[in-house]
Image (cartoon, coloured by chain):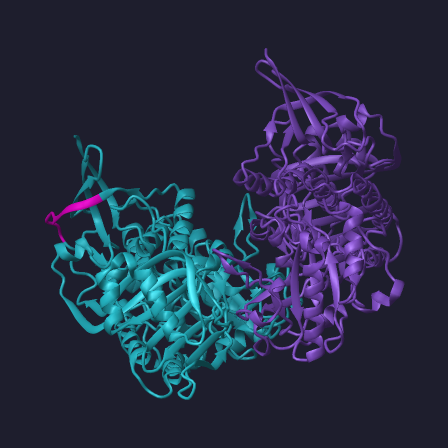
Chain colours: A cyan, B purple
Amino acid sequence: MCSSTSHIDLLIVGAGPAGLTAACWAAQYKMSTRIIDQKGDRTKTGHADGIQSRTLEILESFGIVDPILKQGIHDVDMSHWTTNNETGNIERRRRYEADTGQRSRFGQILLNQGAVEQVFVDHLHKKNVRVERHKAAESLHFSPTADDDTQQFPVVVGVRCIGNNGEKETIHARYLIACDGAHSWVRNQLDVQTDTVSEDSTWGVLDIVPITDFPDIRQACSIHSQPDGSIMTVPRENRLVRFYIHLRGEMKEEAMQHPSRSPRTMVEMAEGLMKPYSLTYNYCDWWSIYPIGRRLVKQYRPHERVFLTGDAAHTHSPKGGQGMNVSIQDSYNLIWKLGAVITNGADPTILGTYDTERRPVARQLMDLDTRLVQAYEKEEKDISKGIYEVREQYAGFMAGVDVAYTHSILITEGGKDGDSNLASNITLGMRLPSFLVVYLCDGAPSHLAQRLTSDGLWRLLVFPGDLRQPERMKALVNFANIFSKSSYLAHLQHISAPEWRCHIIELLLIQSCPRSAVNLLDLPELFHPFDDTMGWDYWKAFADDRDQAYKGYGIDKGGSGCLVLCRPDQHVAWIGSMEDTSGLESYFSSIFGPLR
Amino acid sequence: MCSSTSHIDLLIVGAGPAGLTAACWAAQYKMSTRIIDQKGDRTKTGHADGIQSRTLEILESFGIVDPILKQGIHDVDMSHWTTNNETGNIERRRRYEADTGQRSRFGQILLNQGAVEQVFVDHLHKKNVRVERHKAAESLHFSPTADDDTQQFPVVVGVRCIGNNGEKETIHARYLIACDGAHSWVRNQLDVQTDTVSEDSTWGVLDIVPITDFPDIRQACSIHSQPDGSIMTVPRENRLVRFYIHLRGEMKEEAMQHPSRSPRTMVEMAEGLMKPYSLTYNYCDWWSIYPIGRRLVKQYRPHERVFLTGDAAHTHSPKGGQGMNVSIQDSYNLIWKLGAVITNGADPTILGTYDTERRPVARQLMDLDTRLVQAYEKEEKDISKGIYEVREQYAGFMAGVDVAYTHSILITEGGKDGDSNLASNITLGMRLPSFLVVYLCDGAPSHLAQRLTSDGLWRLLVFPGDLRQPERMKALVNFANIFSKSSYLAHLQHISAPEWRCHIIELLLIQSCPRSAVNLLDLPELFHPFDDTMGWDYWKAFADDRDQAYKGYGIDKGGSGCLVLCRPDQHVAWIGSMEDTSGLESYFSSIFGPLR
């Protein structure tokens, strides 16, 4: 038995969706990262299965959304069924079409968690990152350090290989990300306090290939069979259907006392609730029984160098199909900040925003979950209406696109100087919605979001208005001159900043007159930078020829334009007028300090 | 040096686009196939780079279009430039938007041939098919056999490993597919006659990262600089641009006599033609010089057991971006027929249709090429108009979607019995256009073509009309009864045909009333077959809720419907009324003979 020691920037404990997202994001930065998991393999069956719009946007920003879209179920109708008190049979009350395309260019996908994990694992493999499996963290302590010296390795984790000879290793990390799930070992080591709510309610969940004459079995259904109980069904890949069944009374006892008979018992119970329809199965992929409860940690960052994400930070019922999404989004929020601190010298105070941005989201999730569980479990007349109302009210939150982070060092305060009128449909702190624009150089259509990839760059979107108007062109040239001559701003832009450690910002131009009216090479070189070998970069300038972007963002096409700054996670950080380069400079200097 | 012998169903010689398509298609059948190539690797740079609509449809039917769409350039504008005689400078005359979505759900993609080959190689790898590289065919003879006994292995090919110890092998194959390019060894062995046209014209081609102030460099351009010459440019992946330059006089001599200086010479020549714009480069990916010529073999099947595909059968200039496409489409036409003969007992006479279907396409390609070359080279006033007219006239042919195969054992004759009025926009022999429909079971939208995958099945599309009308439901039930009770037809359908060697046909239902008005399980079981483990199949029935399919196919939504049969390559084989099951039976019995 030998023991070794290593020093790395990030240690990720746990390779579920939160941990894999963290590893994937970290691989975009020049920092050393390792990801360990005590299990021998990825999730094989069951667990989470809803992938919401915002998560799909994030996966696209990493270039890995295609296999998810290909494997998953999309855009299915939803139906609500309740009992007809006269016949005692359930009847369809409402059927809704999926509301795709309303809030995001992606709808919702239904696919098992393991398939999502595999897409991350395949991507990491191409990036030469390997999940180290069968490795368990077994000790955690901190070596003394000045808190703000990010170049030290104060987190000391003892790791043991499970099996064979139990090799041990000591890892010294700058930062530790705990993605180790509901029973988080890291959280327990640090004795993190939680707010916990347990309800006297138990549900069964199972993935089966159902054999049934229930006509809506391939739709997402809520079935409320009064007074006996309720069911939620979700259609899935490979003919599977996910069933959630509220277990009550004898059924609950039976299911819990005889685990080996549980799936059969639960399906019999479901069949009783779905009268007059029959339900049976020959193939069960996965099942579980869980009590309804909620837990939220009181600190997302229990130590200066340790962060909790995903189930390690928050647990709740699976009603809203949120778990995997909020976990992925936690890591997506955190890692670029660490990347900026470790590789670009950003002020470590920005790490404080992880808690202030993500804990309120989990809090909101707890509220949603409470209301959804109540809606499913309470015995009232128009149950489907109750569920529908909750879902309607939280639709944008559940899709993940209505999340707005509050004012901080990373999000400027809105409203002052009337800047909010410059782009009246953009909300500071929310992720930028995407619209179809065309490249100025060739007319090829592109969603603007396809240029906001997850590569660690802030993106400044320059909306100069209609460049056929001489004063608009003049304002653009003026902006470009100031930007290029401000040593601070110019050095943020990657192509001319060898002395900066890394790229910080990319500029994109979206102008409002037809593409044929403007020649890209006549615009300031800032928007078509030149490289000796590669020539000009033609892919930074767009025209709003589909008439979507200016309208969608609430920017006056004929007006004097504006600047919109997106963080590396596409959330809007700052909005200013075409002249407000000083506002921009002050935003960045608070994060990166003065130019070195 | 050892020598071995093996027996296989198909031997594919050559692993370019035609050979790889053949291997990919063959892997869908239960037959043994090998693919050999004398080169050590796939195409690395240059060569073909246009991928047309129909080719993308075919790639999608194999499930491999996504990486092509992701890597390639799409939907760029096209511009035509000619000289202003007063200034001597070139000027833009027209700029067209790409006409995407008109003829196919895919437009045109620009991507180098090697990337396309890699996508095939990756896919074959997943199917456990390996391209055997460094293997050259060096002898070919035929052992005597009764021509129609497809169970014999009359094609005897001697194969030698190139390099090391030159191992030899003798392969006995049922059939040989020659995909070995313009200088085809197989074609030469069989002394196949060709029609050959050589023109006194030479072009240079090169892939560079251009450094130029020519504003339309990222568009597809034709530049006619009178009287000096013409250029065609095509924007490509990774900042590359493909240039085709008509070489004349001294320039031609210079380029041909000093090959090492050729790219530089050609770019200088191009710059001269693009006055007042400058053109230079620092990176050249590939270049070549070629004489304009055309060659078409007189037989696509020079021996009962040997087929020529792709460049082995036809060569021409690259003007129309057709080469790789027609080659892929040759193999796509051929292999399913061999699969049906070898694995399903189809009559070998169907193999005769390879020549009668594909040689006319090549003939048309020669005509197009002749006209395009003339349009680019001739010195007339409105050259761009000439090119535009040829491109307009051949647009559907160039996209690959207007190809109509003539009447044969595989395509019934149209017009009789007024059947052509049943679906007035469908042409017998053409590939079925695709429209968006929704699944009856869940409302999820799908392009109909996504269900016409390349798996060897004929697909019978049943358009029963509006099933809310009792007589239409009656006609559907009647059709299903006859179909199910006809021992012949029932045995074509895979799920109930254990005694048939393999699947032959799948039925799909597209009905015209709203999905919520029909319950799938109330329809004949033919459209939701049952399996003990997997339950009902919910994915064979659609509603025309987007109001595209009936209108698009020219089928009366309120009328009495029709049956449309597609071959495994999606070309329409037969159209009949809902009652015409005997027509259907007669189509299949001519191919598969009586039921065994």
Q: Quadrant of residue B476?
A: bottom right
- Residue A521 belongs to the span the image colors magenta: no
A227 on left or right of B411: left
- Between residues A160 and A537, which one lies in front from this camera angle? A160
The magenta stretch spans which residues?
A: A136-146
Above or below for A554 versus B362: below
Q: Position of residue A199 (x, y in %)?
A: 20, 74
State whether residue A103 appears in this view: yes
Prevalent SS, magenta region: strand
Q: Is residue A221 left or right of residue B561?
A: left
Residue A295, relative to residue A539: is it above or below?
below
Viewer-nearest residue: B65 or A293: A293
User: As drawn, is A145 to the left or to the right of A547?
Assistant: left
Q: Is residue A434 above or below residue B154?
A: below
Q: Identify the residue at image location x=57%, y=62%.
A: B539
Q: Residue at x 71, y 69 (%)?
A: B478
Q: Quadrant of residue B506?
A: bottom right
Q: Which residue appears at 83% of the width and 43% of the height?
A: B359
Q: Residue, x 43% and y 55% (percent of image)?
A: A62
Q: Is residue B87 visible?
A: no
In this orientation, which residue lies closer to the viewer: B395 or A340?
B395
From the viewer's perspective, tell me whether residue B531 is left or right of residue B555.
Answer: left
